[in-house]
Every structure is written in C-alpha cells, then in structure tokens.
Amino acid sequence: METSHAAEILAALGHESRLAIFRLLVEAGRNGMNASAAAEKLGLPQATLSFHLSHLSRVGLIKGKRESRFIHYSAECSTMDALIAFLTSDGCEDRSGLARRPGFDVTKNHRTKKSNP
C-alpha cells in the first residue's frame, strides 16, 4: 500500500459519521445492508449518508452491490487488513499487540480463519 492511499483511508475514517458507517457495515457482515437501513440505524439523513458512502467507497473501504432497486453496502475488510499491515509492517510483528490478535496475521497481510475451541 502506498503512503498516500493509507493517508486517504485514515482521513476518511477520521470523520465520526464515516467511522460509524464503516463499523456498522463491519458488524453487518458479508451481506451488508442497504443505505436506508444504515441511515435509520445511525440516525443520519439519506443525503448525508449517501455523501459519506461515496467517500468510503472511493477510498476502497466499502463496496456496493445492486440488488433490485436497492444497493447493499458491505465493508471491504481486505482494505482494512492491508492498512493495518501497512501501519504495523515495521515492528509490530515482534510485539504482543496486533500480531497476536486472533484471526489476524500481520506478516501474511490477511485474516486467518478462526479455529473453533
């Protein structure tokens, strides 16, 4: 990941509403949710939500998939994984933080499947 792209992603997440939208879509999982449901859940006007969805999509944090007359948005976890790997690539592998978080391997730059205990 290039530094300029990482900066764009971080700037996008630096806005309270966009961060809330991204977290909501992460919580929604692979199926995501449509814009109307997201607007209702977050208490945002539809036009405001649309503006923020566009910004998040532009930096690659979310994607939209048209289903009938609705667009279902979902988080692009691979983009977040790449950002975390970029941010931690020069040292966090040796520490007890992110590199040891279940389901995430900084050295491989992707999520691993969680094993069932």
Image (tube, grey):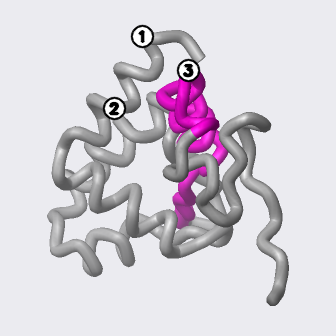
Residue corresponding to mark 2: 10
Query: With 28 as the anchor, is 24 left or right in this view?
Result: left
Which region is colored magenta?
Answer: 70-94
Residue drawn where x is 28% and y is 70% of the image: 39
Residue under circle 3?
Answer: 90
Q: Amino acid at mark 2?
A: Leu
The mark closer to the camera, 3 or 2, is: 3
Pointer 2 or 1: first along the chain: 1
Type of secondary structure dominating the magenta stretch: helix
Query: Is disc 1 surrounded by few (<14), some (14 to 19) or many (20+) residues within 10 Å?
Result: few
- Where residue 75 sits: x, y (%)? 54, 55
- Looking at this view, name the residue that lies furthest to the bottom: 117
Is the residue 45 above or below the residue 99 in the image?
below
Query: Which residue is label 1 attached to?
Result: 4
| Nearer-N-terminus badge (1/3) | 1
* Residue 11 horizontal/vertical position (percent): 27, 29
Residue 71 included in the magenta stretch of the image: yes
Query: Horizontal and vertical percent for residue 70?
Result: 53, 66
Image quadrant holding the N terminus, namely top right
Nearer to the camera, 77 or 47: 77
Residue at (26, 55) in percent of width and height: 49
Residue 54, x across and y down, in percent: 38, 39
Q: Amino acid at mark 1?
A: Ser
> Which tag, 3 or 2, sits closer to the chain's start?
2
Q: Nearer the viewer, residue 71 or 73?
A: 73
Q: Is residue 85 magenta?
A: yes
Q: Secondary structure at mark 3?
A: loop
Disc 1 to disc 3, C-alpha distance: 17 Å
Residue 35 falls left or right of residue 1: left
Residue at image position (56%, 68%) is 32
